[in-house]
Image: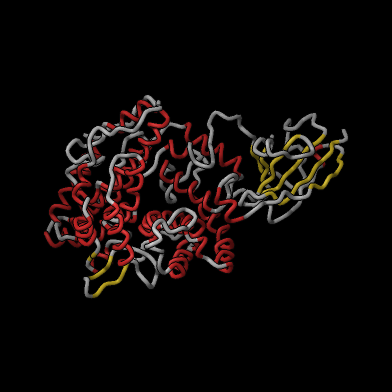
Amino acid sequence: MKLAAALLATIAVGVGILGYQTHQIIGSVPYLFHRNAELKADGYYMAEFEFRMLSIVKKLSDGDYLDAYSTLRRLRRQMESGEGLIKMPADKSAKARYEFLLARQDQTTGAFMDPDYPSFTFIAPTLNVIEALDGLAREVGEPLRLRYPLRFLDRIATPEALRAYLDAHLYIGRFWAEHLPGPGVYGPGISELAYVDLLETTGTYHFTPAWHAAFRSWLDATQDPKSGMWGARMGTPRAFETKRDANSTYHILHYLLTDDGADRDPSHPLLYASELASSLMGAMAAPMPTGEDEQHAWSLEQAQATQLLTRHLWGHLDEAGRAAVRSALEVALTERYRLLDEATGGFAIYPGSPSDVDGTTTALRFIEATGSLPGTADRVRLWGDIEAPAVDSISVESSAAIELPDDPVVNSFRLYVGSVLTDTDRDQPIAVLYPPNKGAVLDVIDLRQSVGRFLASAGASFGNWSTADSIRGSALHPDSSAPIVPVMTIDRTLGDALGDIGKGASDLLFVGYDVFQRPVFARHCHIEN
């Protein structure tokens, strides 16, 4: 939707110049974004949509208003009529999805993108599909083999051709920068090249060491020393200002740093780390704004800034910086859960949009980066060794008489049968209980079955940049076939809230967890009657 706002503003200017009736095309832009969401929810393959829209941005910034107008009209007609659109296969097997995605490749360019669009739009959707194909090939048990070579990459396969391509997409006029918020062409055209390692590990394309050296040198030279970030340059080579683009910076740091912050190439160490960390802290801690356009941008930038701070840049932060990140995470986590759709169990990208695989993937990546998922490197990195709380023991006449503490740190309780909690039993409670006014952040047991419910429902399995398979393979490990654990909100005194849950048990164990799923309280209740 931020792209929608950009198009509305610039089309209004461009169409006005040409004398067209502006209201006809202005109405198309928000409609197309909402229509894209509807089509994804109906199971259509819409992986190219946002990149087609970005091609219109490029035409507008180049002054090709008539071409931009005709492209948008053509795209609207297609999305209204459904002509040329195709649904994901009804057969949900890995083999069927693998064959379906292979068939999306263009035989001339090799890209997983309509060849009628500019070549800068080829990179991101091709990488997205190859990542999905790689996972499906593993599931099927056969090597990944594309039908055609990725010929479009031959155009930038030498250091000289690469530098010319990058320079051609680096600058944008200040007027257009002010009317085109977000990464614009720089995002899919430049920053997505940071994932070429995927092509090399899958054997689908290889660049030379000289090519990589040229790319890293160009990135070093174009990093903004004030903010430490990367983005399009607003202005001309003689006078410019770099857009502070968290989205593009997120992609580029994947190329320059490992997940634990080590330089991938020691001859190109990360520059301006402290300036970068300061800029990203602002993006992570920012509250959700009003307006769909701003919320869409916030959703991506908050998630990506958090992942960069708690992973790639963690080793570059001093103790004060790490403490500041930890203290900001709870508010950021609560804000992210505002995007949970309780009806479907998935997450939206911004309020008012339907939950989908893109929104859910973004949320789960963010949640993992906060150290909230047990068994992950992020949890160890952020919170260290988490000690189990001491267990206090009480005896009560019945479960109805059990009182739980009014502890502001406790976000949820998990209820177990027995008096001792073992590692084996930790993920197998008989109920999840939320104290009054808690539960805005879900207990991980509740979250796991919520996302499992989302995956089991009908809808798209392939979004604009992610897939249902990536959610299934996430650190959350959602399983729609697992037994359902009852979830309820309780008062301090249980009364009859449990019903038949735990009925007949002589020992019940309540373990309280904070919003980061760290155990902070434990009470063993022996039932005398």
Q: Residue furthest bottom?
A: 239
- Asked if 97 appears above or below 373 in the picture, the reply is above
- Asked if 152 appears above or below 2 in the picture, the reply is above
Q: Is residue 328 left or right of residue 161?
A: right
Asked whether 215 or 232 is in front, the reply is 215
| Residue 346: x %, y % from top left | 48, 41
Q: Residue at x 19, y 62 (%)?
A: 13
| Residue 453: x %, y % from top left | 51, 34
Asked whether 502 or 325 is in front, the reply is 325
Q: Is residue 254 left or right of residue 102?
A: right
| Residue 39: x %, y % from top left | 33, 38
User: On the rendered image, what quadrant is the C terminus found in?
Assistant: top right
Q: How many marks?
A: 0
Q: Is residue 82 left or right of residue 483?
A: left
- Asked if 161 appears above or below 105 in the picture, the reply is below
Q: Residue at x 46, y 44 (%)?
A: 360
Asked whether 26 or 419 is in front, the reply is 419
Q: Residue at x 35, y 58 (%)?
A: 248
| Residue 119: x %, y % from top left | 20, 49
